[in-house]
Amino acid sequence: MIEYITYQGKKYPIRVSYYVIMMAQKESGLKLEQIDTNLESQQTIIWYALIAGHKMAKKELTLTREECVWILDECYIEFQKAIFQFGQSLVDMQEECLNGGKEGKDKKKLSQ
């Protein structure tokens, strides 16, 4: 899923994904649960989220990594919403797997 942040009046695609988390872990040396609470790692996450978002949207990334601190300064709430959406999709997927897909089947029955 591609989300958008607005930086200096322009919208930029970001995508929080496996690639982003993997690269942030690799670069920071932190465990997954530590990345979320480490402010410095937020710059790494947004950088790779910008790369992933631009790749998925098939757009050229014109921002630089050095701008990430200022991007976060201006767009922090939008960025956190994108991270929350990614986390929520993981929770939803886990619940669906634990319920054996029952929830999805029940929703399908209701819509018929």
Image (spheres, helix red, strand yellow):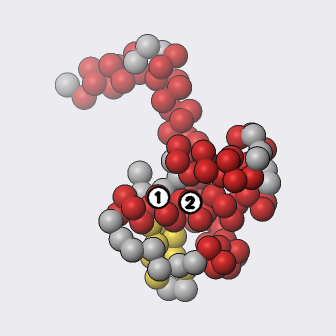
Instruction: List the residue tagged with mark 2.
Output: 48
Q: Position of residue 7 (x, y in %)?
A: 55, 80
Question: How many numbered discs sit on the rendered protein?
Answer: 2
Instruction: List the residue tagged with mark 1.
Output: 52
Above or below residue 4? Residue 80 is above
Is residue 85 at least partly visible in the picture?
no
Q: Position of residue 13 (x, y in %)?
A: 44, 66
Is residue 104 at least partly visible in the picture?
yes
Above or below residue 28? Residue 94 is above
Figure quadrant of residue 107: top left
Instruction: Identify which residue is drawn at 47% across, 80% down.
Output: 62
Front-most of residues 33 and 23? 23
Q: Amino acid at mark 2?
A: Tyr
Picture quarter with the C terminus: top left
Instruction: Identify which residue is drawn at 39% across, 74% down.
Output: 60
Above or below residue 92? Residue 2 is below
Front-most of residues 23 and 77? 23
Instruction: Identify which residue is drawn at 56% across, 60% down.
Output: 48
Front-most of residues 94 and 69? 69
For residue 14, which numbered disc appears in the image? none
Left or right of 39 on screen, residue 96: left
Left or right of 38 on screen, residue 70: left
Rounded to the nearest angstrom, the CA distance separating label 1 from label 2 is: 6 Å
Q: Position of residue 79 (x, y in %)?
A: 60, 63
Look at the numbered disc 1 and give the secondary structure of its residue. Answer: helix
